[in-house]
Image (cartoon, grey):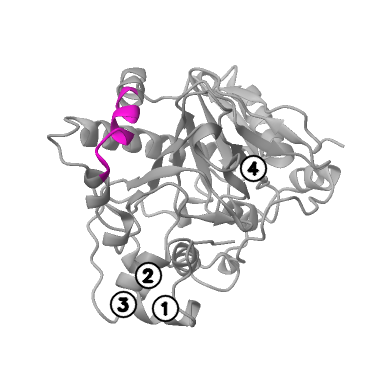
Amino acid sequence: MAANFTCIPILDYSQVASPATRPVFVAQLRHALINVGFLYLSNPPVAQDNIQSLIDYVPKLFALPQHEKDKIRMANSEHFLGYSALGRELTKGKTDQREQFDLATEYQNPWKPGAPEYLRLWGPSQWPDESLLPGFKSTMLCYLTQVEKLSYEFITLLSEAFGLAPDALDLFFDKSPSGMQHRGKVVKYPALDSVASNQGVGPHYDAGFLTFLLQVSPHPGLQVQNLSGEWIDAPPIPGTFVVNIGKALEAVTQGLARATSHRVLSPPTGSTPRYSIPFFQNIRQEIRLSEVHLEFPPEILKLKEQRGEVRATDSVNFSEYDRLPSGEVTLIGRIKSHPDVAQNHYHELFKQIFPDGSPEHGSAY
């Protein structure tokens, strides 16, 4: 079966610029979207000196004194942005052995009382004091802005791969200045000799449209599940992003683009920590996916039929998107993952979701 992949394809973004090679890229992209849900992207249009500067900052970010990291803990932020200590989340009932900073592109939130609560989700990040990490904020924002631009270009290529008009998916985005916010994380997975299990993060799907992952350190650990239930390694390849499909994009493409189960294993005993920086492409918070119906050419739909049905994998079930605004779906997931934020900032929703009080750990799934 074509869908039962044994490796992650590598696509060369430099092919996009030439009329001679662009069709080759688009054909490879179509295969990856329908049959794998993951791909490596080489030669991405993101400045390598910016990437290297960001990589150099990452160990220093986690080496900050604990009290400095705690000053910007996520519980302070109604936007669910900030620092999360090791072992704060569960996936499938097991602790995720990761420490992380959630950061985002710049956005000034215009929310006022009476507007939907989910519109509070986007807003300013919390940053370490500039004197502690001079230049980190500007370096990270520069990086996020470049990947945001790439993510929009990639959506246009995806439309082309599926036989749609280039702007077919533009309704999911507000590309005006400060019209959208996209999120990033800087993540540390400690080695096994300092944590209790090898679950860096358990089997899951990503939520939104596209994820662009920068694997900062050379450690393996990312694995992708094929239809036989086998876990396929996606080791770091220098100069690439790992790109994968989220559940919202799978839903709006009627299952053509495939969201694929994946996990991260902790580095082995005696190793150094594993670091990574994922970028998550958001969509407009007000949009309901059930209101959008895309018409795909018959020859594209036939490729989905040839793939066959995507059966259940080890991943947890993910919230359905069909009835609620996407922002509301996201807010519910965030509250389940980070009940301390909800307890501080979303009192009524906290009481609805946790009628017995706050759980010891957050768990969206």
Q: Residue at x 27, y 43 (%)?
A: 66
Q: Local crowd at mark 1 within 10 Å, few (<14), some, or many (≥20)? A: some
Considering only order in the chain, which callout, 2 or 4, is on the residue closer to the N terminus?
4
Taking depth in this image into account, of 68 and 292 the one nearest to the observer is 68
Q: Quadrant of residue 357?
A: bottom left
Taking depth in this image into account, of 127 and 199 the one nearest to the observer is 199
Q: Which quarter of the figure is the C terminus placed in? A: bottom right
Provide the residue span drawn in magenta. 56-66
User: Which numbered tag is attached to residue 240?
Assistant: none
Rounded to the nearest angstrom, the CA distance separating label 1 from label 3 is 15 Å
Q: Which residue is mark 4?
A: 262
Q: Tell me if residue 127 can be seen.
A: no
Rounded to the nearest angstrom, the CA distance separating label 4 from label 2 is 27 Å
| Residue lying at the far left of the rendered structure | 131
Q: Which residue is mark 2?
A: 342
Which circle, 1 or 3, is nearer the viewer?
Answer: 1
What kind of residue is marked 4?
His
Considering only order in the chain, which callout, 4 or 1, is on the residue closer to the N terminus?
4
Q: Which residue is mark 3?
A: 115
Which circle, 4 or 2, is nearer the viewer?
Answer: 2
